[in-house]
Image (cartoon, coloured by chain):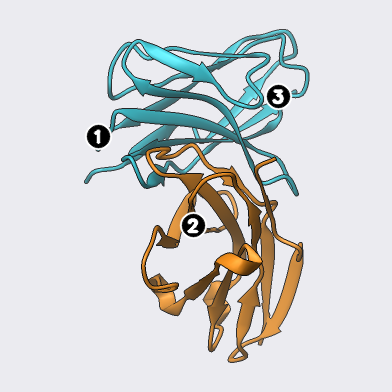
Amino acid sequence: AQSVTQPDIHITVSEGASLELRCNYSYGATPYLFWYVQSPGQGLQLLLKYFSGDTLVQGIKGFEAEFKRSQSSFNLRKPSVHWSDAAEYFCAVGGSNQGGKLIFGQGTELSVKP
Amino acid sequence: DGGITQSPKYLFRKEGQNVTLSCEQNLNHDAMYWYRQDPGQGLRLIYYSQIVNDFQKGDIAEGYSVSREKKESFPLTVTSAQKNPTAFYLCASSTQAEAFFGQGTRLTVV
């Protein structure tokens, strides 16, 4: 079965601390992987994506993610969190030529302590 | 500016009524999608369309209907057959590789 698992429903970090959000996927074909961020009552904004090539991808707002095929993981990281990073984060998987036909994880809500 | 416009932002429906959510895009994308978002469940695909006058059911199509008469527009109707319609609805359009989302419509049954 195709699925995405985000094990952490809610994470709280202190401002300035590092962050890692976990994502594991199960997908029958070569995966296209995405991380999106959502502020309350808003749509989804793409942070970064992985299609092929270098397994460490850089995104917007200082985020990066590393694709590990052997672990079926695509974890999101940020070296120093800012209060404005508080939001909900979604990992998603799709396939080549699947466009927006994505499978989403349940989301991880990030809170930032001052 | 190119983008996806969903309207209205908030919608209230009485039980037994059908309501239609609007989604318009000016990105010239062939493919469009409707997702439903519930707390703690991520996004689930309702319907998608890869070309005008054609659409396919997603994972949770029961109680919903769509049309795709124009490339720019992909309205979603929530029918009275949808037993639990209160949710946040997101529309998207895509290239072959990447999706772009609208700002969503929050539907509440009163």
How many numbered markers are drawn? 3
Q: Residues within 10 Å of mark 2 (few under 14, many from 20)?
A: many
Q: Earlier in the sequence, mark 1 or mark 3?
A: 1
Q: Which residue is located at x 30 percent, y 42 percent?
A: B3
Co-location on one chain, circles 3 and 2: no
* Residue where numbered disc 2 is placed: A34
Residue A8 placement, left or right of A105: right
Q: Amino acid at mark 3?
A: Pro
- Rendered location of residue A102, percent (x, y): 53, 42
Q: Which residue is located at x 39 percent, y 45 percent?
A: B100
Q: Which chain: orange? A: A
Disc 1: which chain? B
User: Which of A107 and A31 lies nearest the eye of the viewer?
Assistant: A31
Residue B75 placement, left or right of B19: left
Looking at the rendered image, the quarter that the N terminus of chain A falls into is: top right
User: Which of B43 and B38 lies nearest the eye of the viewer?
Assistant: B43
Q: Which residue is located at x 21 percent, y 46 percent?
A: B1
What element does badge 3 sit on? loop
- Rendered location of residue A94, percent (x, y): 50, 45
What element does badge 1 sit on? loop
Of the two numbered discs 1 and 2 in the rendering, the one whose residue sits closer to the viewer:
2
- Rendered location of residue A15, percent (x, y): 61, 88
Disc 2: which chain? A
* Residue where numbered disc 1 is placed: B26
* Residue where numbered disc 3 is placed: B85
Q: Residues within 10 Å of mark 3 (few under 14, many from 20)?
A: some
What element does badge 2 sit on? strand
Asked if marks 3 and 2 touch (Cβ < 8 Å), the reply is: no
Look at the picture and state if B10 lies above or below B54: below
Co-location on one chain, circles 1 and 2: no
Disc 3: which chain? B
Q: What is the spatial separation of the Cα atoms under label 1 and label 3, in whole angstroms?
A: 28 Å
